[in-house]
Amino acid sequence: MSDTDDSVAQFPPKDPARPEERHGSGFNVATRLVHAGSDPARFGGAVNPPVYRASTMISQNLAELRRKRQLHASGERAYGYGRFGTPTTHAFEDAVAELEGGYRSLVFPSGLAACTCALTAFVGKDDHILVPDNAYFPLRNFARNTLTRFGVEVEFYQPLDVAGTIARIRDNTRVLYVESPGSITFEVQDIPALAEAAHKRGVTVLMDNTWATPLYFKPFTHGVDVSIQAGTKYLVGHSDAFLGIVTATRESWEKVQHTARQFGQIAGPDDVYLALRGMRTLQVRLERHWRNGIELADWLGSQPLVQEVLHPALPSNPGYALWKRDFTGASGLFAFQLAPLPEEALSAFFDHLELFKLGYSWGGYESLIMLYQQHEVALASRTSAAGALVRIHAGLEHLDDLRADLQAAFKRVG
Ligand SMILES: *Cc1c(COP(=O)(O)O)cnc(C)c1O
């Protein structure tokens, strides 16, 4: 039997990589994206890790069982029970932790599960948390409707009001939640300033970093303690799987892991595999999303029926300076404000688009469009806009075709 065969037979052939061994790689991020979490020698030479379908995991003898128990008790990885991870989930988690620049990552069955579990990890009865009023709506609802039932005081703040937000920090504030840019109205938050003030008061900073992905915003170098990704969006990238992932600093890791274990949330192995596969092409896809998005945003700004374009990478955007300072790119998601239109005109605009499909979510290869009604926008935004807000996800199609599709929609409205 060759060494390789042997290593397959003796699973696991070596302990999973420890975080301190993974970091400090001198490669560019594009290179790291291709190789992070990858270990072909471990899987008989296969480039991609196998999809492990495992609940029960057998120990060869008592000594191994005891070793696994000990590892598990100390929070280390041990292949003792599938709920606590398999080589498939660990490969994905290692890749994300490396990309985010955090200590470790944990996978969740959806982006929302990642948000709610991360938040729950840091709060208890009589604690106070600060959540931006433009945060992802289901997360807002969880904080407002569920956390409050357990005695957590939830306060919403305006994402652009740095001084006002800092002033709201109290002795019992445990979490400052940030999401930048907001996923409907695209406010860019001053995260380093907020994080610095939060840390002075012992407050943990949690960030939903789905829009930029860790490729275009490095949460941990900007003061974030816990970074959350709806992997469903750009990491998976093909609109065919749900996934969430939470990455933490060494200091925050234990709370995240402890709570996650108790909730028992696990992601299916196929979905984890798809997310890891999606990551390999993340950079090339994001470049196109970015270019298509900013070009469309720029062009939309010159359309008579468009009142305002909300895209942080447009120099006219109020968040542009912060975006330029803190981000290294833009994804394909942005919005624009339509002039007030009667219902028939709105239907004329939306109902005959060929490429922009009317659907929730974003981050897939295909272009999407979504209408947000007045009351939803008013909740999320400080602009008192009269017309409808239209959110665009610029997909990977050719820019000319996307522009022509929207051009035709404007023509139909007249
Ligand atoms: C979609 C989304 C989520 C939730 O992800 P799911 O996988 O759909 O649960 C969280 N945050 C943001 C910003 C999102 O857009």
Image (tube, rainbow, N blue to C red):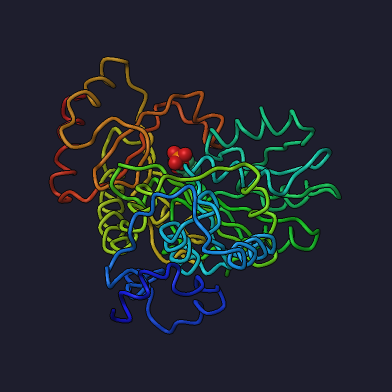
Foreground of the two, 407 or 196: 196
Please tell me which residue is depicted at 60% across the width and 50% down the height of the picture: 178
As drawn, is 188 to the left or to the right of 399? Answer: right
Please tell me which residue is depicted at 32% across the width and 70% down the height of the picture: 34
Q: In the image, residue 287 lies at what x, y percent?
A: 28, 61
As drawn, is 109 to the left or to the right of 258? Answer: left
Foreground of the two, 13 or 176: 13
Please count the marks in the image.
0
In this rendering, does residue 163 appear at all? yes
Foreground of the two, 288 or 92: 92
Q: In the image, residue 235 lies at what x, y percent?
A: 37, 54
In this rendering, does residue 318 appear at all? no
Q: Is residue 397 depicted above or below 201 in this figure?
A: above
Q: Is residue 383 depicted above or below 347 in this figure?
A: below
Tell me the quarter of the image containing the N terminus. bottom left
Please tell me which residue is depicted at 71% across the width and 64% down the height of the picture: 196
Tell me the quarter of the image containing the C terminus. top left
Q: In the image, residue 407 lies at what x, y percent?
A: 17, 37
Q: In the image, residue 268 lies at what x, y percent?
A: 41, 45
